[in-house]
Amino acid sequence: MPVNNTPDGPVWRQRTQAQSLLHWAGWLLGTAVFVVCWQQISDATTWFFVWDAPRIAGDIWTRATPPRWEYIAQLGRPIWDTINIATLGTLLALFLAVPVAFLAARNTTPSALFVRPVALLVIVSTRSINSLIWALLLIAIIGPGVFAGIMAIAIRSIGFCAKLLYEAIEEIDQRQVEAITATGASRWQVMAYGIVPQIMPAFAGIAVFRWDINIRESTVLGLVGAGGIGLQLSSSLNTLAWPQVSLILLVILVAVVISEWVSAKIRGAII
């Protein structure tokens, strides 16, 4: 910390004068940016609808309650499709993410100069595009339906799983790898007996965690035509069938809570 010498003795300061000026300049700049952004948002907002939102929300709540309980018989297949989209999409993503992770990890990639950048590009590109956008693109290519939803979930999940997995690979204990290598084991044997056993707990945790996330994401893919319970939600919203909407939202909430409980139990058993 800087010290200022005064007649009464040294005075300790957290920052020098230059650091203090820079600190306050940063706050001033941040405030100016906030004001400009807020002004632009305010100009583009119809505030009448914002102030009227509580009344509209109350009106929708009145229309949506009680839920249309007899409609639940038509939600069994859609919620099953949603679970299948999440599960199959997660399995396909894991199958593709494992080799990508090994190619991206510094200690397992065949070439840090050529192969690793390609693997990292795959990870970044699949993670940076939302599953809804993947679903829209795939629907245009292969048509609407559950298969498009599975592929959208899978592609979106590759980067997530591969990133966490390759970080786990890079953090392994190299002494075990060196011990197996010293026995004359081949590259594949080193990978099978020195690396894979160390990353299996991380792999299992990543798989369960991503499946839990995909349950949530798959519930809305039907809004763009990729199958699942979101398709029922979209049709109910389009026809203003609010009692059906409230029932669908309740079913989605129950499915998400159950998936959260299952994933927590599995992660607890693994860890």
Image (cartoon, rainbow, N blue to C red):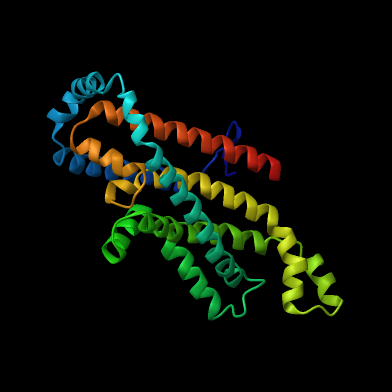
Q: Position of residue 210 (x, y in %)?
A: 52, 50
Q: Quadrant of the C terminus?
A: top right
* Residue at figure coordinates x 22%, y 21% from the top left: 63
* Residue at figure coordinates x 48%, y 65% from the top left: 123
Q: Quadrant of the N terminus?
A: top right
Q: Foreground residue, 217 or 76? A: 76
Q: Foreground residue, 85 or 27? A: 85
Q: Position of residue 207 (x, y in %)?
A: 58, 52
Q: Position of residue 119 (x, y in %)?
A: 51, 71
The answer to whether any part of residue 6 appears in the image is no
> Up-down: is 20 above or below 46?
below
The answer to whether any part of residue 66 appears in the image is yes
In the picture, residue 261 is in which quadrant? top right
Q: Position of residue 51 (x, y in %)?
A: 18, 25
Question: Does 53 sit left or right of 194 as displayed?
Answer: left
Question: Does 103 sit left or right of 149 as displayed?
Answer: right
Q: How many marks?
A: 0
> Up-down: is 155 above or below 35?
below
* Residue at figure coordinates x 27%, y 43% from the top left: 32
* Residue at figure coordinates x 22%, y 24% from the top left: 60
